[in-house]
Amino acid sequence: MQASVAAVQFQPRKGEIEANLDRIGEIFADLAREDPPDLIVFPEASATGYFLEGAVHELARGSSEYVDALQRRWIAAAGPARAVDVVLGFYERDAGTIYNAALYATLGGAGARLRHVHRKLFLPTYGVFDEQRFVTRGRRIGVFQTAAFPSAMLICEDVWHSICPTIAAVKGAQVLIVPSASPGRGIAGPEIETVGRWRSLLCSAAAEHGVYVVYAGLVGFEGGKGFTGTSMVVAPDGRIVVEGPPFEECVVRARIDGEAVDVARAGLPFLGDLDSVLPDLLLDEELPLPRGGRAAH
Amino acid sequence: MKTYCVEDILPPDPLAIDAALVERWLERFIVNELVRRRGMSTAVVGLSGGVDSAVTAYLCARALGPENLYCVRMPYATSSPESLEHAAMVVRALGCHERTIEITAAVDGYLRFEPEADGRRRGNVMARTRMLVLFDLSQKHGGLPIGTGNKSERLLGYFTWHADDTPPLNPLGDLFKTQVWALARHLGVPREIVEKAPSADLVRGTTDESELGISYPRADPILAYLLMGYRRPTIERHGYSSAEVGLVHGRLESTHWKRHQPTTAMLTNTAINEFYLRPVDY
């Protein structure tokens, strides 16, 4: 099992959905012309920009609308025969409720197919962030099968809570796809402090569970806040395979290989350990967990 | 057995900056916000002869090219000749456009109706007149005035409301004064400008320190710790006197209004910026 992945450090134009989709179409064309990847990942809120405040009501769309729009642009870029998987971060409207979401779709070939939508669980609402005021949180982490790997998506702050990668891995994910929009903070050292935090989080998640992490970071400035980018692919042994520079639009590419997952898990069988210990931990009655019920999707 | 013990809960150097990182970051900020977002390429900076406006001009020149930077000296009759010369040094170093516009006639034209105005009022009139010039010249050149206010003066309320704080872009507003000095040294701002005592130069002979009652190297760490959420007694245990912490805390707590837009009476559930919330770049 192998796949070629491309994480796109994308700088959207605020609120200009059509222009952003057209720009995505141009990136499709560039990638299709060079060496078409199997999976292209765009960051969180790529369709609109991240800080929307109340404008999210004007800009949230259904996932199928984006799948159709992406399908048209992929076929225009690569022709009808070639298939590709795409992840796009967008504000989703579903039955009148708005989410910060990411869709995973297979485009081209036999027709577009929406494989999964992840709705961001942890909505940062502190300091510069105000998500919970404007969108509703998701309620589950789904693992879904792609052409190559069982995968899960986590959006931005989801990954800062280590239980999210853990649940994704326990449910079978071998690839964690992480669209993100991270406004940089911290100027004390030669590197933006938050970039270092991200790197450490993603490498830890990969190494603890023996999973690939494909992280796509938004870039550009919105109202003085600069999104850092630094998209990266982290191997299942916790090693960064490739990383993009801060602030610049670019594409980072890597080949991911199931053999590396096998090797990492053989060397550090933490996930197997967790499979056997987790039930005991979760049955601990002192944990503040609801008993006897299950949350709706 | 050796014991390793740290009882100090305060971060040791809350003002540390990597000036090269900050330079790259702020140049990108200027290009993104001015050129990409607003479709303009020209910046107008009022050069006072001080370090904040010098640093702002250096950043703009590097981000946009000196041909796209208009620096304006706006002396009043009582302004120090040294300030004018220091501003000229910046222009010579950068090779940007320069204008010198005396504001004395404009300021005095108004003040002759208010001859009893004290130094503070006169200073505010000068600051607001300078802003009038900067906005007008920006319109003339199809650009934007770029602000020069730093975080220390914003937090201490040491600026003229709706004057120094009005430019739509402000690259230095999240940097304390001592950090601006570090950035200035990195950028190669002339030593005379970096090392002189900071002054608004509104009243001859006064310095920021004499007006504020505390120096920036003493005030900045106190501000930084207060903003992080540390309590006053904790800061006082770390080498800052109760009087210093009290002075800084008092200025901070009494000037929140200066860091906000005017207070609007809210009458409906579509009140702007209360219910109707749209980002500045939407």
Image: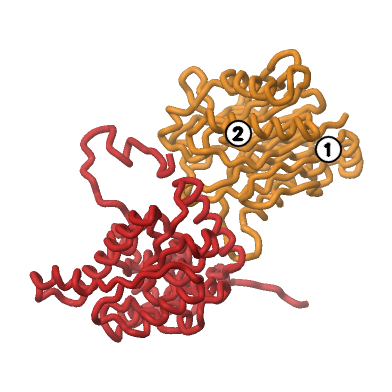
The correct choice, above or below, for A91 with respect to B20 in the image is above
Quadrant in the picture for the C terminus of chain B:
top left
Q: For the residue labelled by badge 1, is the local secondary structure a helix, a strand or a loop?
A: strand
Which chain is rendered orange in the image? Answer: A
> Label 2 is found on which chain of the structure?
A
Q: Is residue B111 above or below residue A264?
A: below
| Image-quadrant location for residue A207 | top right
Q: Amino acid at mark 2?
A: Arg
Front position in the image: B234 or A288: B234
Give the residue at mark 2. Answer: A23
Q: Which residue is at 39% across, 79% downward?
A: B198
The residue that label 1 is drawn on is A255
Residue in the picture at 57% in, 37% down: A122
Tell me the residue at 51%/47% (across/down).
B36
**Where residue A204 sits: x, y (%)?**
75, 47
Q: Judge depth for marks 1 and 2 and give the one in front.
A: 2
Q: Quadrant of the N terminus of chain B?
A: bottom right
Name which of mark 1 and mark 2 comes first in the sequence.
2
The quarter holding residue A276 reads top right
The residue positioned 86% from the left and 37% from the top of the image is A261
Q: Colour of chain B?
A: red
Q: Position of residue B16 (x, y in %)?
A: 57, 70
**Percent x, y for residue B130?**
29, 66
